[in-house]
């Protein structure tokens, strides 16, 4: 089986803060990581590769420093990896991004299966995977927690709102994968820091200039802002009986009791 995995390098969102005056994200000193659902997608791909004697290719769209993370993908068991990078891609929304990924996929090889994370922790739209499936004219299954290949059939378990759905998916297919219990640091000792990767430009993948970057984007982020700050609880001073009286007064003032 010939498998493609799309990964995204994202900021560790728990460390990102927003400047309340400018609305800009403060990324200084913020660590970058592989999007967690993408790591699980990669692990699924490696497992399928080993069962089917196939091969795994990884692509990522972003800056050249992504090579640090592609080395981890190779350490996990991927065979090849590429970076799709150009200033012309800046400002791409999910539609433009999925188009670029589809052009790269068609340029690199003929894939039977494409795996992506279900969504990214920075954008959280969940749109790129399904859009990519449409660009490739692939069957698709989303929000998959487990994937098996039995008797030449792809069996996916989907987490849906009221339970687990088990379905058969015909190849070629695209699967979006939920976050799993995979720790990328477990492969740290196998990372080869000397590995370099081919960087694909818009010209390399035959991308239409009108369909990439801001030109090819149908949506625009108008504003980024943090949620309204909510005042925290009060600390009541005094003896126990005084505290009780104060609590009762607060509850009465808020009409919780009479």
Image: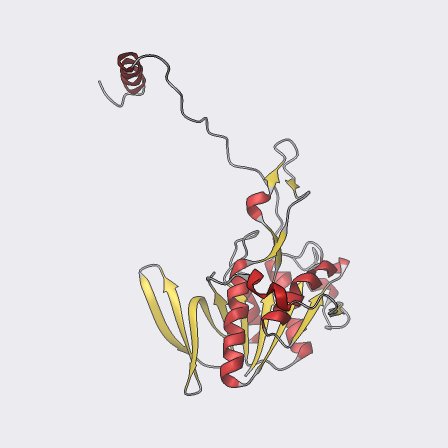
Is residue 54 in sight in this rendering?
Answer: yes
Query: In the drawing, does residue 90 fall left or right of residue 240?
Result: right
Q: Which of 197/168 is in front?
A: 197
Query: Is 48 in front, or is 101?
Result: 48
Residue drawn at (57%, 68%) of the image: 132
The answer to which image quadrant residue 160 occupies is: bottom left
Give the percent coordinates (x, y) of residue 15. Answer: 58, 43
Residue 60, quarter of picture: bottom right
Residue at image position (48%, 66%) is 177
Q: Is residue 14 above or below residue 39?
A: above
Between 240 and 218, the residue placed more toward the observer is 240
On the image, the x and y values in percent for residue 148 come to 43, 77
Judged from this view, the residue extending furthest toward the left is: 258
Percent of width and height locating residue 218:
62, 56
- Image position of 205 (left or right of 55): right
Quadrant that contains the C terminus: top left
Q: Is residue 130 visible?
A: no
Give the total number of marks visible in the rendering: 0
Residue beneath the point at 62% across and 43% down: 222
Front-lying residue, 133 or 74: 74
Whether residue 150 sits left or right of residue 254 in the image: it is right
Colour style of the rendered protein structure = secondary structure
Q: Quadrant of the N terminus?
A: bottom right
Q: Residue furthest bottom?
A: 151
Q: Where is residue 221? Give x, y as percent.
A: 61, 47
The answer to which image quadrant residue 232 occupies is: top left
Identify the residue shown where x is 61% and y is 38%: 18
């Amino acid at each position: 089986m010939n498998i493609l995995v799309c990964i995204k390098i994202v900021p560790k969102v728990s460390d990102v803060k927003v400047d309340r005056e400018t609305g800009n994200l403060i990324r200084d000193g913020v660590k970058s990581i592989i999007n967690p659902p993408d790591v699980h997608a990669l692990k699924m791909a490696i497992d399928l590769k080993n069962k089917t004697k196939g091969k795994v290719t990884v692509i990522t769209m972003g800056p050249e420093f992504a090579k640090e993370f592609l080395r981890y993908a190779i350490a996990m068991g991927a065979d090849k990896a590429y970076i799709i990078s150009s200033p012309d891609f800046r400002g791409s929304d999910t539609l433009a991004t999925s188009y670029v990924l589809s052009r790269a996929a068609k340029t690199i090889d003929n894939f039977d299966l494409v795996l992506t994370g279900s969504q990214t922790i920075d954008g959280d739209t969940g749109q790129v995977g399904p859009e990519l499936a449409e660009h490739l004219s692939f069957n698709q299954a989303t929000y998959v927690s487990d994937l098996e290949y039995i008797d030449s059939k792809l069996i996916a378990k989907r987490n849906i709102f009221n339970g687990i759905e088990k379905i058969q998916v015909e190849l070629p297919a695209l699967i979006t994968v939920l976050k799993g219990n995979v720790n990328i640091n477990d492969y740290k000792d196998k990372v080869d820091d000397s590995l370099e990767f081919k960087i694909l430009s818009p010209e390399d993948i035959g991308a239409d200039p009108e369909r990439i970057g801001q030109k090819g984007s149908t949506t625009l982020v108008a504003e980024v802002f943090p949620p309204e700050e909510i005042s925290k609880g009060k600390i009541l001073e005094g003896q126990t009986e005084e505290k009780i009286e104060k609590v009762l007064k607060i509850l009465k003032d808020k009409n919780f009791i009479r």
